[in-house]
């Protein structure tokens, strides 16, 4: 009798098990999976280089962190630092034009403006073998009406920690972190050791917050913007 009861219970369990395979249990599990947050992109940009000691250390730090940046170079400093410029391009950074001698372009005659831009364009083209290097005018300014004479897109900035003024790593870092937003373009100068230190601190902090560091050109492309010659871009959205 006991053996029959055990057999009956076993058979009953099998029946219930097989019935369970065909049962659909409603669930909200899919709804509980959080949607992936949109990526946050930002562009680090550096002016006034290249400078041997500081730019080289910055490139090392960016490579270690997998971060891209944009370097606006002064033309007369390129020849002595050709290896650094070649390295910038090889490691996926954007190389741009910051005029030949850091000449202000606003209030300057059109002939001088053209020469300052074309000389650096020529030096970069001879070294890297390509053309169309985007321009950052010194001080972020060109004379009204001169934009149509600029043959490439121009890049300004939306975050300026005034690193050249304080030369204080902590102040520069905090100024950037307080002002940065997705699609920001950050202005720094890779000729100051304090700016290099601040830049790498910012990368470390913002990467933990989900930011991705891209070039200025990539930032615009990611926002669906087709860059136009003579147009000044201050953020990744225009």
Image (cartoon, rainbow, N blue to C red):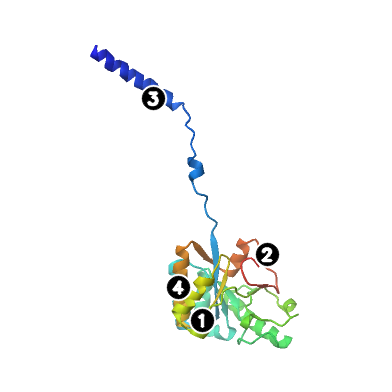
CB of mark 1 within 8 Å of CB of mark 2?
no
Q: Can residue 56 be seen? A: no
Instruction: Give the x, y percent position of residue 160.
Output: 56, 77
Q: CA distance from mark 3 to mark 2?
A: 61 Å
Front position in the image: 173 or 120? 173
Q: Would you name the residue on which mark 4 appears?
A: 200
Q: Which mark is nearer the camera, 3 or 2? A: 3
Spatial separation of the CA atoms under disc 1 and disc 3 = 70 Å
Label 3: few (<14), some or many (≥20) within 10 Å?
few
Q: Nearer the viewer, mark 4 or mark 3?
A: 3
The residue labelled by disc 2 is 226
Q: Position of residue 189 (x, y in %)?
A: 52, 80
Pointer 3 residue:
17
Crowdedness near tag 2: few (<14), some (14–19) or many (≥20) residues, C-alpha within 10 Å: few
> Which quarter of the figure has residue 125?
bottom right
Gap between marks 1 and 4 measured at Cα? 14 Å
Figure disc tally:
4
Q: Residue at x 55, y 56 (%)?
A: 38
Label 3 or label 2, whichever comes before in sequence order: 3
Mark 1 or 4, which is nearer the eye?
1
**Residue of label 1:** 163
């Amino acid at each position: 009798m006991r053996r029959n009861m055990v057999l009956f219970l076993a058979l009953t369990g099998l029946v219930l098990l097989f019935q369970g395979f065909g049962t659909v249990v409603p669930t909200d599990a899919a709804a509980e999976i959080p949607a992936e947050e949109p990526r946050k992109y930002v562009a680090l940009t550096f002016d006034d280089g290249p400078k041997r000691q500081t730019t080289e250390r910055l490139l090392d730090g960016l490579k270690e962190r997998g971060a891209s940046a944009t370097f606006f170079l002064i033309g007369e400093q390129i020849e002595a630092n050709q290896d650094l410029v070649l390295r910038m391009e090889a490691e996926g950074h954007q190389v741009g034009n910051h005029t030949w001698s850091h000449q202000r372009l606003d209030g300057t005659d059109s002939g001088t403006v053209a020469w300052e831009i074309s000389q650096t364009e020529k030096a970069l083209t001879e070294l890297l073998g390509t053309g169309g290097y985007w321009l950052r005018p010194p001080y972020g300014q060109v004379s009204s009406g001169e934009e149509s004479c600029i043959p490439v897109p121009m890049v300004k900035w939306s975050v300026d920690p005034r690193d050249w003024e304080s030369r204080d790593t902590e102040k520069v870092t905090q100024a950037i972190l307080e002002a940065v937003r997705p699609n920001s373009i950050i202005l720094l100068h890779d000729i100051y050791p304090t700016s290099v230190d601040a830049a790498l601190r910012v990368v470390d902090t913002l990467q933990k917050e989900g930011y991705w560091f891209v070039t200025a050109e990539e930032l615009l492309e990611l926002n669906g913007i087709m860059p136009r010659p003579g147009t000044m871009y201050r953020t990744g959205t225009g």
